[in-house]
C-alpha cells in the first residue's frame, strides 16, 4: 500500500508535526514515483536510514507551520511545545538584564539552555550569550528553515556535550529554484502595539548545468515591543505579595517605590524620614514621607523588548563529480535591541558616604534643624535621579557563521562528510542612566563659595574636583538637579561581549555486513571544537565606581577533541509478532583541555510487532562540560546582608557550630575579651563579596536518561490515518553545576564536621581590627560548584489523525487533520545539600500541558485552529503564603491561508482569539516576572493580536 506524504512525514517523526496539522499534504492520487523515499539522517542518529524510523521520539515543526504562525522568531513557536520549559532569556523577561536584552533561547524540559543543544543541519551553532552554550534564535534565518526536529533526553553520545535535556536540530533549505518574496504585519487589536513586521526575499537557482544550486535569503524584521504604561495590568507598581483569588489589578491601591523624585530624607538617629516639597510653601516645606510621594516605576518600563533584525543567509552546493559534493553555509545577522527602565534609585550608601553634611548650603533649613537636634551631622537620603534620564541599553549584536564541507558516496552504500566552520558573535551595548560615583560624591560635597551667608554661591568643596569641572548638585526637591550637574555626574556605560567558535569534523556511515534480519549499519567520526568568550565591562564598572556593583572582565577558552561510533544491528524479522527487531548503540569519547576526558554512551532497542505497532526503548548516559562563565568568571560584587552563625556564641555555647566558631582565633580572641561574640548592627549590614566566581576545578555533569515508548500507526481506510505514540521518560542529572549562595557558603562552612572545609575558603574575617570588630565577616563570596542532583519524569503523548472527506462524502474535497501533543510531568526533583524539593505543579512546571491543532486543507485553502493548555499551577510550593492555585490557562489561535493564484498566497491569523489574560502573580510573589503581574515567560499572552501576510513565488 502506498501511503500519502502526510503519513510518511508522520512515520519519519514517529510523532507529529507540532503545529500545522496538514503540512505538505499530497492528494491521494499522487503517483508512486512522487512518493519515493530517499535515505536521510533523522535527528537522534547519524546513520542513514531509508525506513524513516527514528530511534527516539521526535517532534517536527515544518516550514508551513512557521510561516503561517505569524511569528517572526521560530523560538516563539517552539516554546509552545509541551516539552519546552521556561526560557532563560526572551523578549518578555530580559528588560532588566544587565546584558542579553531581547535574546531568545530554548530550554527543553526546564533543564536549562546550557543543557539544550541547538544544531543547524546537524552541526553546532555559535552561542548568542557570551560564556554559555545558549543559542540566540534571532540569528537563525526563519524563512530558510525547512523543518525543526526536537528530541528530548540525553544525546551526548551522538552529538557531544550539552545534550542532557535534548537536541533541537534546524534543517535549512538547500535546494531551491526561483524567487520568493514574503512579508507579514501584525499588532494587538486593542492596543495597536507589539507591532511585528517582516519582509523576506529568497532566491535560488541551479548553475553549472544543474551540478550546483545556490539559495540566498535576505530578511528584515521589526518587533516593536510593548511599554508597561500602555497596559492596564502593568501600568502601576502593584501591591506586593497579596492575592484574593480574583482579578486584583484595579481593586487595590498600588505601592510605589520609596525612591522618590523629590527625595526621601532621613534623620540617622531616629529613622524619621521626610520629603522636601517646595510646592507646599513659599520657601518650601518638609513633610513626613508617605506613599503619596512614591515613584511609579512602571511608567518607564518595557513590557516586551523591541527587536530589529537584518539577516543574510545562503546555502550553496556543487557536485564536483558523481561521488563528491561541496557545500557552503553562511549566515550573517545583525540584531538591534533596546531595554528601558526607571531612572537610577540612589542612596547615600550607594556612594559609600554617610550622607550630606548639614553645612551643605542646599540642605533645607528645617531638615538641618531636625538632624542637628538629634545630634547627627549628616542627612541620609534616597533619591530617584530622574534628571539623569531613564536607564536602558541599546545593544547591537552581529553574528557571522560560515561552514564549508565536502561529502560524498562510496560504493556499496557508504557515505562520508567532512566539514570546517567558524562563527563569531560581537555584542556592543551602550547603557544610559548610570552615574559616576566619584563625581557624584564630589558634587554633593558643597560649600558656600564666598562665605557670605547673605548670598548663595554654592561650589564644590574639593579644589581638585573644581579644577576638573565639578558642578555642585542639589538633590532636594523634584527637578532640582541642574542640566550642568546632571551632565557632570552622568556616566554612560559601555559593555562589549564576544564569542568565537571553530568546529571541524569527519564522519562516515554505511553498512558493514549482512545478517539474516538485514544489514548492520555504523556511523563513526571525529570532531574538533574550540570555544572562546569575553565579557568586557567599562572601566567604571570594573572598579565599582558607577554606583552599581563591581564587575570584572570575564575571558576564557577551551577546546575538545572527540571520536564517536554508532551501530545499528537488525536482530530478527518476519516472525510472528516480530516484524522487525533491531538494537543500536553509540559511544563518544571526548578529551577537553580543561576537564580532561569524558565518555557518553547510548543503547536502544526497537521492536516492530506488526505493521502498525512498534515499541522503542533507550538508555543514554550524557555529559556536560562546564562552560566558560562557570570556569572563568571573576564574579560580580554583592553587598547583601548575611547571617553569621557565630553571632551570640560564648565560651560555653554547646554544639558543633559553636566549637567550629571558637576554633577561629579572631572569634576566640573577641570572646575572651568581651565574653560573647556579639555583632553590632554596622557589622551585620552590607557585607561585601563577589557572587558567581568561576571555578576551574569543576567536574562535568552527568545524566542517565531512559525512554520507553509505544507507537501505533495505522490506516483505517475511509476513516482516516492515525498515529499515536506514548513515551515515558526519566532524566537524572548528577554533579549539577550551580552557584552556591553566600549564606549557604557560610552555613555549610560552620555546620560541617570536617571544619574548615571548601566552603570556608569563601568566608573572610577581620583578623587585625580592634577588639570590638575582631572576627567580623568582611567578605563572603559565592561561586560555581558541583553539587546536587536533578530528576524529572513524565509521559509524552502524541496523536495525529487525518481523513479525506471525499472517501465518505461524494464530491467533498480536501483533508481534515487533528494533532495533539500532550505532556504529563510526574516529578521535577532538585536536591541540593541533602534537601530535595519537587517542583512539579509549580508555575512553569505544570503537571499537565498540551498543544492541539485542528485543520482543514484543500488545494487552495488551509484553515487551522490551535489551542494551548497549561494546567493548574501554584506560584510556590515552598512558601506557604504563595501556595495557592492560579488556575488553568487556555489560549486559542486561528489562521487561514488562500492560494489566490498560482504564484500568490495570502494568509491571516488571530492569536489569543478569546482575549485570555494570564493568571495573576503579583510583585513579590515567587514566579513573578519583574515589571509584570504574571510570569511572562510561562504565559504567552499580550492581548489579542492579528497578523496578515503574503508569499509570492516566481
Image (cartoon, rainbow, N blue to C red):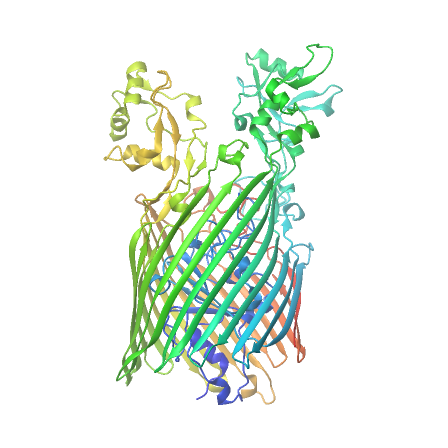
Q: Quadrant of residue 74?
A: bottom right
Using the rendered image of the protein, determine whether residue 97 is visible from the camera's viewpoint. no
Using the rendered image of the protein, determine whether residue 513 is visible from the camera's viewpoint. yes
Task: Tell whether 534 sits left or right of 622.
Answer: right
Q: Which residue lies furthest to the right in this view?
A: 282
Q: Is residue 65 above or below residue 245?
A: below
Residue in front for this viewpoint, 63 or 614:
63
- How far across and how far down the image is residue 484, in percent? 69, 28
Q: Quadrant of residue 207?
A: bottom right
Quarter the C terminus occupies: bottom right
- How far across and how far down the image is residue 271, in percent? 54, 21
Residue in front for this viewpoint, 549 or 107:
549
Q: Is residue 650 above or below residue 14?
A: above
- How far across and how far down the image is residue 344, in percent? 59, 35
Quarter the N terminus occupies: bottom left
Q: In this view, does 482 lie above or below 23?
A: above
Q: Is residue 716 above or below residue 674?
A: below
- How far across and how far down the image is residue 90, in percent? 53, 53
Amino acid at each position: 500500500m502506498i501511503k500519502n506524504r502526510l503519513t510518511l512525514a508522520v512515520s519519519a517523526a514517529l510523532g507529529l508535526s507540532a503545529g500545522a496539522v496538514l503540512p505538505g499534504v499530497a492528494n491521494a492520487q499522487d503517483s508512486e514515483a512522487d512518493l519515493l523515499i530517499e535515505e536521510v539522517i533523522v535527528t537522534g542518529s547519524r546513520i542513514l536510514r531509508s525506513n524513516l524510523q527514528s530511534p527516539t521520539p521526535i517532534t517536527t515543526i515544518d516550514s508551513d507551520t512557521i510561516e503561517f504562525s505569524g511569528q517572526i522568531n521560530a523560538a516563539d513557536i517552539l516554546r509552545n511545545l509541551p516539552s519546552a520549559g521556561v526560557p532563560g532569556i526572551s523578549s518578555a523577561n530580559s528588560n532588566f538584564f544587565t546584558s542579553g536584552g531581547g535574546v531568545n533561547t530554548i530550554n527543553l524540559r526546564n533543564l536549562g539552555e546550557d543543557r539544550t543543544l541547538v544544531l543547524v543541519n546537524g552541526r553546532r551553532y555559535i552561542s548568542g550569550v557570551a560564556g554559555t552554550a545558549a543559542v540566540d534564535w534571532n540569528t537563525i534565518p526563519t524563512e530558510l528553515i525547512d523543518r525543526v526536529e526536537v528530541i528530548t533526553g540525553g544525546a551526548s553520545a551522538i552529538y557531544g556535550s550539552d545534550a542532557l535535556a535534548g537536541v533541537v536540530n534546524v534543517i535549512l533549505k538547500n535546494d531551491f529554484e526561483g524567487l520568493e518574496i514574503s512579508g507579514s504585519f501584525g499588532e494587538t487589536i486593542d492596543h495597536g502595539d507589539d507591532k511585528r513586521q517582516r519582509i523576506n526575499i529568497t532566491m535560488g537557482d541551479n548553475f553549472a548545468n544543474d551540478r550546483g544550486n545556490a539559495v540566498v535569503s535576505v530578511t528584515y524584521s521589526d518587533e516593536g515591543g510593548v511599554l508597561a504604561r500602555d497596559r492596564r495590568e502593568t501600568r502601576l507598581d502593584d501591591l506586593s505579595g497579596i492575592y484574593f483569588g480574583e482579578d486584583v489589578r484595579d481593586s487595590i491601591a498600588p505601592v510605589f517605590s520609596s525612591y522618590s523624585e523629590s527625595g526621601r530624607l532621613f534623620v540617622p538617629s531616629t529613622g524619621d524620614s521626610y520629603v522636601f516639597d517646595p510646592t507646599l510653601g513659599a520657601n518650601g516645606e518638609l513633610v513626613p514621607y508617605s506613599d503619596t510621594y512614591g515613584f511609579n516605576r512602571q511608567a518607564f518600563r518595557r513590557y516586551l523588548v523591541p527587536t530589529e533584525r537584518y539577516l543574510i543567509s545562503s546555502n550553496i552546493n556543487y557536485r564536483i563529480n558523481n561521488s563528491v559534493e561541496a557545500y557552503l553555509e553562511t549566515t550573517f545577522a545583525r540584531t538591534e535591541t533596546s531595554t528601558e527602565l526607571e531612572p537610577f534609585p540612589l542612596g547615600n550608601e550607594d556612594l559609600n558616604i554617610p550622607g550630606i553634611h548639614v553645612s551643605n548650603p542646599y540642605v533645607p533649613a528645617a531638615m538641618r534643624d531636625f538632624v542637628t537636634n538629634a545630634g547627627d551631622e549628616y542627612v541620609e537620603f534616597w533619591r530617584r535621579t530622574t534628571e539623569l534620564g531613564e536607564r536602558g541599553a541599546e545593544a547591537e549584536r552581529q553574528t557571522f557563521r560560515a561552514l564549508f564541507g565536502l561529502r560524498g558516496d562510496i560504493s556499496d552504500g557508504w557515505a562520508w562528510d567532512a566539514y570546517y566552520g567558524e562563527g563569531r558573535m560581537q555584542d556592543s551595548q551602550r547603557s544610559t542612566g548610570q552615574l559616576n560615583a566619584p563625581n557624584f560624591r564630589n558634587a554633593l560635597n558643597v560649600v558656600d563659595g564666598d562665605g557670605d551667608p547673605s548670598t548663595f554661591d554654592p561650589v564644590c568643596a574639593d579644589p581638585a574636583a573644581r579644577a576638573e569641572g565639578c558642578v555642585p548638585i542639589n538633590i532636594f526637591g523634584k527637578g532640582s538637579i541642574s542640566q550642568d550637574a546632571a551632565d557632570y555626574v552622568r556616566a554612560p556605560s559601555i559593555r562589549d561581549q564576544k564569542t568565537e567558535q571553530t568546529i571541524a569534523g569527519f564522519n562516515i556511515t554505511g553498512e558493514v555486513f549482512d545478517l539474516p534480519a538485514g544489514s548492520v549499519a555504523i556511523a563513526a567520526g571525529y570532531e574538533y571544537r574550540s570555544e572562546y568568550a569575553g565579557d568586557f565591562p567599562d572601566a567604571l564598572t570594573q572598579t565599582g565606581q558607577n554606583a552599581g556593583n563591581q564587575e570584572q572582565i570575564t575571558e576564557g577558552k577551551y577546546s575538545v577533541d572527540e571520536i564517536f561510533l554508532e551501530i545499528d544491528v537488525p536482530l530478527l524479522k518476519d516472525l510472528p509478532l516480530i516484524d522487525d527487531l533491531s538494537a543500536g548503540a553509540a559511544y563518544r569519547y571526548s578529551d577537553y583541555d580543561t576537564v580532561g576526558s569524558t565518555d557518553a554512551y547510548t543503547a536502544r532497542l526497537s521492536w516492530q510487532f506488526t505493521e502498525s505497532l512498534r515499541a522503542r526503548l533507550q538508555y543514554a548516559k550524557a555529559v556536560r562540560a562546564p562552560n566558560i562563565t562557570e570556569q572563568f568568571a571573576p564574579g560580580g560584587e554583592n553587598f547583601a546582608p548575611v547571617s553569621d552563625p557565630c553571632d551570640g556564641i560564648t565560651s560555653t555555647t554547646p554544639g558543633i557550630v559553636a566549637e567550629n566558631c571558637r576554633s577561629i582565633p579572631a572569634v576566640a580572641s573577641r570572646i575572651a575579651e568581651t565574653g560573647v561574640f556579639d555583632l553590632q548592627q554596622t557589622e551585620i549590614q552590607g557585607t561585601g563579596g563577589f557572587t558567581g566566581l568561576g571555578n576551574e576545578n569543576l567536574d562535568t555533569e552527568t545524566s542517565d536518561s531512559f525512554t520507553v515508548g509505544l507507537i501505533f500507526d495505522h490506516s483505517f481506510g475511509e476513516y482516516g490515518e492515525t498515529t499515536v505514540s506514548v513515551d515515558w521518560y526519566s532524566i537524572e542529572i548528577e554533579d549539577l553545576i550551580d552557584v552556591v549562595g553566600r549564606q549557604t557558603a557560610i552555613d555549610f562552612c560552620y555546620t560541617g564536621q570536617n571544619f574548615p572545609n571548601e566552603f570556608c575558603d569563601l568566608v573572610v574575617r577581620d583578623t587585625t581590627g580592634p577588639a570590638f570588630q575582631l572576627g567580623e565577616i568582611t567578605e563572603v563570596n559565592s561561586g560555581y560548584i558541583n553539587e546536587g542532583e536533578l530528576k524529572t519524569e513524565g509521559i509524552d503523548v502524541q496523536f495525529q489523525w487525518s481523513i479525506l472527506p471525499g472517501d465518505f462524502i461524494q464530491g467533498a474535497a480536501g483533508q481534515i487533520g487533528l494533532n495533539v501533543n500532550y505532556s504529563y510531568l510526574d516529578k521535577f526533583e532538585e536536591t541540593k545539600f541533602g534537601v530535595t524539593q519537587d517542583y512539579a505543579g509549580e508555575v512553569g512546571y505544570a503537571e499537565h500541558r498540551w498543544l492541539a491543532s485542528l485543520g482543514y486543507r484543500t488545494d487552495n485553502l488551509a484553515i487551522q485552529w490551535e489551542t494551548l493548555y497549561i494546567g493548574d499551577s501554584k506560584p510556590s510550593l515552598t512558601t506557604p503564603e504563595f501556595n495557592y492555585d492560579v488556575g488553568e490557562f487556555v489560549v486559542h489561535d486561528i489562521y487561514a491561508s488562500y492560494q489566490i493564484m498560482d504564484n500568490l498566497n495570502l494568509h491571516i491569523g488571530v492569536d489569543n482569539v478569546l482575549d485570555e489574560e494570564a493568571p495573576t502573580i503579583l510583585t513579590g510573589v515567587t514566579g513573578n516576572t519583574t515589571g509584570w503581574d504574571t510570569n511572562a515567560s510561562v504565559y504567552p499572552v499580550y492581548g489579542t493580536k492579528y497578523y496578515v501576510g503574503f508569499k509570492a513565488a516566481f
